[in-house]
Amino acid sequence: DIQMTQSPPSLSASVGDRVNITCRASQSVTTYLNWYQQKSGEAPKLLIYATSSLQSGVPSRFSGSGSGTDFTLTISSLQPEDFAAFYCQQTYSIPPTFGGGTKVEIK
Amino acid sequence: EVQLVESGGGLVQPGGSLRLSCAASGFTLSSYWMHWVRQGPGKGLVWVSRINTDGGSSTYADSVKGRFTISRDNAKNTLYLQMNSLRAEDTAVYYCARDGTVRYSDAFDIWGEGTMVTVSS
């Protein structure tokens, strides 16, 4: 199985901050890397697929980059509604595996 | 509206069984592979199982292989997860999710709201 490691596990940031979350795969997943946002008590929501493609309806302040084993989710200007947990996921091989998550909290 | 709604969760004793359902609406279920994903209390997301469009092929996480069975009834627009020999470590919220196909890099583009399964005596 491909192991996905996210960092940091949590971070505190202020509204308007630029936030970067990284995800590292134990082997290459080419560009089969997706990002999800999960607010407390809710189901996960797809934000970005195929490393950098924005899901319909997702604000343009979210972006993704990377390839191979190293990926980044960037929020260019953090908004109050962005405080949540974020998960990366590889769908390059079965089983599809998720990172451990990054919880973004209010500073 | 495209929607997935899970049901069937609850409290069950260790060794017991439960069947989860996931009702799809707003899209043609038979066109999509489907998945189950679970999340233990305070934990991250863990993939459980997937099934192809006609139900003829399925795959499982090692942790549930031989105990869980995924199935679907496309005529009823419903996905199922039969869970047998349940253990305390199966306690989680169970989500069904739609596979967005290669167009979306096989990302899970639609999720249900989840159903809670608690395994405890």
Image (cartoon, rainbow, N blue to C red):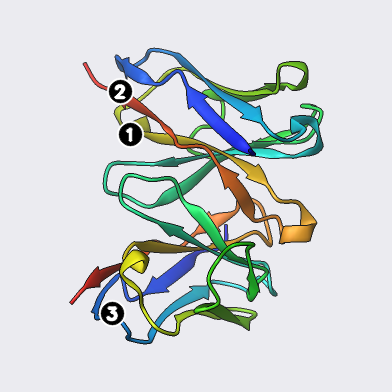
Q: Which residue sits furthest left?
A: A107
Q: How packed is label 2: few (under 14 Cα within 10 Å), some, or many (20 or more)?
A: many
Tag 1 residue: B89
Q: Residue flagged by tag 1: what amino acid is it? A: Glu
Mark 1 and mark 2 in contact (Cβ < 8 Å)?
Answer: yes
Tag 3 residue: A15
Which of the image's four quarters has the N terminus of chain B?
Answer: top right
Question: CA separation, marks 3 and 1?
Answer: 38 Å
Vertical placement of residue A39 versus B67, above or below: below
Say which quarter of the image contains residue B121. top left
Q: Residue flagged by tag 2: what amino acid is it? A: Val
Chain at tag 2:
B
Q: Are marks 3 and 2 on the same chain?
A: no
Taking the image as shown, residue B41 lies to the left or right of residue A59, namely: left
Taking the image as shown, residue B20 lies to the left or right of residue A85, namely: right
Instruction: Residue A24 in the image: state x and y as whole percent.
Output: 50, 76
Taking the image as shown, residue A52 lies to the left or right of residue B65, namely: right
Instruction: Residue B81 in the image: state x and y as whole percent.
Output: 56, 24
Mark 1 and mark 3 in contact (Cβ < 8 Å)?
Answer: no
Q: Secondary structure under badge 3?
A: loop
The label shown at residue B119 is 2
Choose the circle earlier in sequence order: 2 or 1: 1
Vertical placement of residue B87 versus A18, above or below: above
Q: Residue at x 78, y 57 (%)?
A: B102
